Amino acid sequence: MSSFSDHLQHQFIHHFPYSDARYRTNAQAGLDLYRTHSFFILHNDEQILNVKIDSFYVELNKQLLPESTCSCQHNGFCEHCFAAFFYMYSLIEPLAPLFKKWRNHEKAALTMLSAKQVLKKPKATFQEWRQTFEEQYTLFMQGRNENDRSIYHEYYQYYYRSLVKKAPDHPLLYALFCMYGAVHTFYKLSAQLQAHQLSTNIEESFVYSHVYKITNEIYATADSLKQTKYDGDALSIIKDSIPYIRELLHKDMPLQYERIEIYRVIWQKVFTLEKWRKTEERELKAKHGSFINNTALSYLLFLQEKDGEAKERLSDETLQMIPYLIPWLNDLLHEKETDRFAQWGSYIMAYIGDYVRTVPTTYQGSRNMVSMIVNLFQHYKDLTNDQTLYTEALQTLLPYSFIEYSDFLYASDQLKNWVELQVLLQYDSIKYDEQTIEALKQKDEKLVIPLYHQMISKLIYEKKKSSYQEAYIYLQELKRLYLQMNRSLLWEHYIEELAIKTKKQRAFQQLLEKGDLLNV
């Protein structure tokens, strides 16, 4: 092993300890990215590796890995940084020995002992943890002004990180403590946000980025706990925490979408026992049916595969529910439950067109939502080779899905439909590249006629000599095609109408006369 690879291995093992559930989660996600995605090297020297992966840009600091950055803006060494590291390391050494040393380092502290071995004596209760959270919050607020609107970045930076330092050493309890600590931090920030009554613009500009740091911690720690079997203290802590997590459904709190997502992720990945879910279902059915309560109840029914009842609960509010349903469908695809996805995909298809046209307030907002929905159905298409739902979604979401639908039609050689789409939606490109035109001609020369008409109209509208010259070239080609098709009368009608419409554009008229386009 070279000194450089030894240096990288030492950093990896000591800066990202295997005992930390967040690093294990991000490393696993990074390994998946490394195995399934292409890397584009932008810069590489002794100090820095700049690489693009999965649309994100990573700057990997080879000398000090924790100083690496990523455009995803996730706090700390994210999955994209891990992917870049694995890519770089694999070029000089195999990864398997690295992982083995990582897992075995400091065995006494890092080996995952069974819950029965470690938790046979009570060491903690959820009530004690909540007391710790409150004590730390009191210390955090000392010397701080609750009315200071710049406080939001400090909730994650100082308060949550102070809680992590109080977490127990055992990996299972450590992950649980960090998850609940992040939820408590979220509650405190939400209360502050409710007290300040900030405008939407200020929230989006100065608050949400800090909210996302906290929610990302919740999602990461919850993910590290999935498929865990609980016993002893861990089981008792989770049971006692269920009413605390249910407080996320309080209808008067801000950050409704984030609260529902936190509730969803924890019930999906941590609160996995069937008896817990049945009890929670009864609790929610006994409560007043607010939107957020109804959404949570529908999700619990979804988790138990009671899809018919879940849809009945949604029926009065499906349009409003669309953003909340997308993660559910994502989970079905992740688990490759394609039959259930097809049923739920067909269900939301009746609403998504109206949703993107009425709920978002901007075109970009609609585009972002459309992109997420289209990606869902494309993933389903890739898993099943069934294009039906994907095509229906692309058509339903027009005009916002124009880019995706256009690419799909062209890639699948549906060139006639592709041309009709360009003309129907008046695609604003002034001209198509020669490769596209040639591909259409090879398929059927008649396919380019509508595009030539479209480009000629736009070029003439510019009222510039250079544009007139370019339009003249397309007119010559258009004339050739019409005559070749024995459609001379159609050409004569078209060019005469064009001459009348442009009679005040003298420079263009001169081109028509000079080129003898008016005569067949």
Image (cartoon, grey):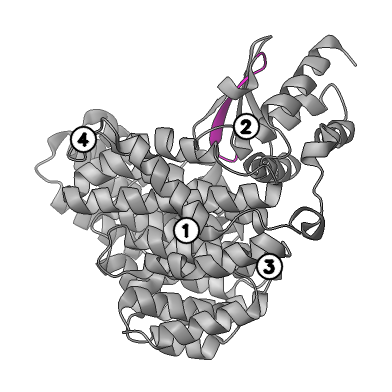
Q: Secondary structure at mark 3?
A: loop
Quadrant of res 470: top left
Label located before the other in sequence (3 or 1): 3
Give the amino acid type for the residue marked by disc 1 in the picture. Met
Say which residue label 3 marks. Answer: 335
The quadrant in which residue 360 appears is bottom left
Number of residues whose C-alpha sits closer than 10 Å to that of mark 1, classed few (under 14), some (14–19) or many (20 or more): some
Q: Name the residue at 72% across, 61% down.
A: 228
Crowding at dot 3, Cα within 10 Å, few <14 / some 14-19 / many 20+, comes out as few
Choose between 414 and 486: the one closer to the eye: 414
Mark 4–mark 1 distance (CA, rounded to whole Å): 40 Å
Residues marked 2 and 4 touching at CB (< 8 Å): no
Q: Quadrant of residue 341?
A: bottom right
Q: Nearer the viewer, mark 4 or mark 1?
A: 4
Q: Is residue 313 above or below residue 181?
A: below
- Image position, residue 38 (x, y; %): 69, 37
Measured Cα–Cα span from mark 1 to mark 2: 24 Å
Residue 194 among those drawn in magenta? no
Q: Main secondary structure of the magenta part?
A: strand
Residue at which label 2 appears: 81
User: In the image, what residue occupies the spot 39% across and 51% down?
Assistant: 186
Of the two numbered discs 3 and 4 in the rendering, the one whose residue sits closer to the viewer: 4
Return the x and y of residue 362 as percentages of the image width and height: 25, 54
Residue 394 visible in the picture: no
**Magenta extent:** 54-63
Using the image as rendered, state which of residue 22 and residue 439 is in the foreground: 22
The residue that disc 1 covers is: 372
Residue 145 has which mark?
4
**Residue 57 part of the magenta-drawn span:** yes
Q: What type is the residue that disc 2 sits on?
A: Cys
Identify the residue at the far left of this view.
Answer: 504
Going by the numbered disc 4, the residue's amino acid type is: Asn
